[in-house]
Image (cartoon, rainbow, N blue to C red):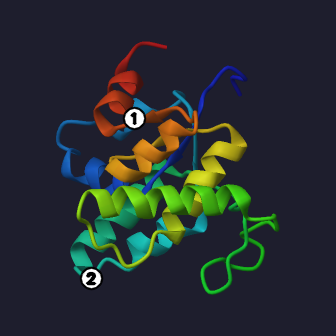
Amino acid sequence: MDLDLKSYLLDTTMFNTFLKNQHKTDIEALRGKGRFYVTNFQKDELSATPESKKKDNLLSLFDAIAPEQVATKTFVISYSKLGAAELSDGMIFNEILSGLNECERKHGKKRKDNRKDALIGETAERNGYIMVSDDRCLSKVMKSRGVCVMDWNTFISGMRAPS
């Protein structure tokens, strides 16, 4: 295993974007280009896709990329799963959550809940991962916290570059 490989935390948006662009992007472009991580939320969200064929395609893509699941850094009752989250004081999680809520208010979005995104963002921050997301508010908040964030185009361009 190459110790110089970068570590990427893939947000759920990346699987949807990859599926939309699969005709332009070969899954093999990812092989050997990085270490890919998710929390338990990404697969759960993909599994909740209402359209059966799209859900099957997303889950097949998830399995083909084969990201390693890592624990979130904070346990939040009603969100976190036992064994898939760590205990913390919640300070970083709450700071990220506040930032996401404020960003969405400023953009006129009415999102039901940002807790999962805050947990994903905190996990990227505390593990030193590069976050890969097309979620505008999540990207903005995490960049403001010093986390390296890539959108789909930047990420896939880097994956296509020679090793």
Classify 10 Å Cα crowding around label 2: few (below 14), some (14-19), many (20 and above): few
- Residue at label 1? 28
Query: Can residue 26 be seen at all in this image of the molecule?
Result: no
As drawn, is 4 to the left or to the right of 147?
Answer: right
Q: How many marks?
A: 2
Q: Which mark is residue 104?
A: none
Q: Is residue 134 above or below residue 101?
A: above
Amino acid tagged 1: Glu
Q: Secondary structure at mark 1?
A: helix
Classify 10 Å Cα crowding around label 1: few (below 14), some (14-19), many (20 and above): few
The residues tagged by marks 1 and 2 sit, at their Cα atoms, a distance apart of 28 Å
Q: Residue at x 39, y 70 (%)?
A: 46
- Residue at label 2? 50
Mark 1 and mark 2 in contact? Answer it, CB < 8 Å: no
Q: Secondary structure at mark 2?
A: loop
How far across and down, in percent of the image, does residue 94 sit?
63, 63
Q: Residue at x 67, y 37 (%)?
A: 128
Q: Is residue 133 above or below residue 100?
A: above
